[in-house]
Amino acid sequence: MCAAIIKRPLWVSCFVLLLAMGCGQPSGSQAIVQIGTTKASLFGPPLEYRALQPRLEDLFLSRVVFAPQPDGQAIGAQLELGNYAFAILSAKEYCNIEDPSKLTLLAAAINANGKTARKALIVVRAGSKFQNVSELKGKRFAFGTYGDLLTDHAVRTALFKAGLPVKELATELLPPPIAYEGRLYAGGDAASKVAIPIFRGDVIPISAGVIDEVAWNKLSETGGNVITGPAKDDFRIIGETTPVPELLVVAGTGASDEDVAAMTKFLLNQAGSDANICQQMNIKGFTTADKASYDLARILLKQVE
């Protein structure tokens, strides 16, 4: 047996030695920089962060891992424990963190409109008789995505403030994923259902719906049709929500001061000039985060009509 060990090939011995020494492990202040996210991927980083990962690995001289969690609350727990150095969070995910006082806000994303927040617009068909939100009592209304801070929570709050509690809309009888709690959810197709209900298969017309302002600004001014979709002149805007802030990058208790400074500098000064990062994350870059706007979003999330 001893002879067998002595005679094993030299490359095997080298391989074992390299493994014991941590062959291939990254160098730097920490072996792995973990970034919390609700995005997940079976192979490699999430699609949204494929271009971001190598840039961060160059920044930290360490391996960067995007660690998925089910929601903001779970990410917040990992950040507070120091298991994650950073996290990329939507406004709702950040607001779901019960106590964010130990987190450091590094940067907020800039959307396609060049803003760090977006509103949702409440629209009716251009030829509709409805002039204001309160006139929609008993009518069908197309919300965006169920549970979304902007196209669900903020819209319901806007309707309530305009004199139309959600319970006074027509009750939807379809099961999920189309209708939840008696409300119709059409995702990004909500505005189209308002503009061309007959071609969408809606026997009972949908009188009004929601579209976020970034999507609105991408519509052509005129020339909407069934194939290419509606245009702005197919609608009339009768209301809007309060703005909801864009995604946020935060640091947890496990991030060193040096890493926090490096990440902040990168986000504010370099990330926006990387076309691949911006395209994959659907942003124009980052700017300094306004904590007050996220505090207002927390209030919005907890409001009950």
Image (cartoon, rainbow, N blue to C red):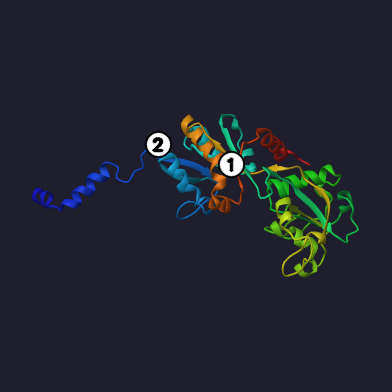
Q: Is residue 43 left or right of residue 235?
A: left
Q: CA distance from mark 2 to mark 1?
A: 24 Å
| Helix, strand or loop under label 2 | loop
Q: Which residue appears at 78% of the width and 43% of the height?
A: 157
Q: Is residue 211 left or right of residue 253?
A: right
Residue 74 in view here? no
Q: Is residue 177 left or right of residue 208?
A: left
Image spot of residue 251 (x, y percent): 53, 35
Disc 1 residue type? Gly
Q: Is residue 181 above or below residue 204?
A: above
Q: Which residue appears at 53% of the width and 53% of the height?
A: 276
Estimate how packed mark 1 is, as few (under 14), some (14 to 19) or many (20 or more) residues with alpha carbons within 10 Å.
Answer: many
Viewer-proximal residue, 93 or 303?
Answer: 93
Q: Residue furthest left?
A: 3
- Residue at label 1? 72
Image spot of residue 262 (x, y percent): 49, 35
Image spot of residue 136 (x, y percent): 86, 53
- Residue at label 2? 30
Viewer-proximal residue, 263 or 175?
Answer: 263
Numbered label attached to residue 47: none
Viewer-proximal residue, 270 or 215?
Answer: 270
Image spot of residue 283 (x, y percent): 61, 49
Residue 246 in view here? yes
Q: Which residue appears at 47% of the width and 43% of the height?
A: 56
Q: Give the mark nearest the N terminus, 2 or 1.
A: 2
Q: Is residue 191 above or below residue 117?
A: below
Disc 2 residue type? Gln
Estimate how packed mark 2 is, as few (under 14), some (14 to 19) or many (20 or more) residues with alpha carbons within 10 Å.
Answer: few
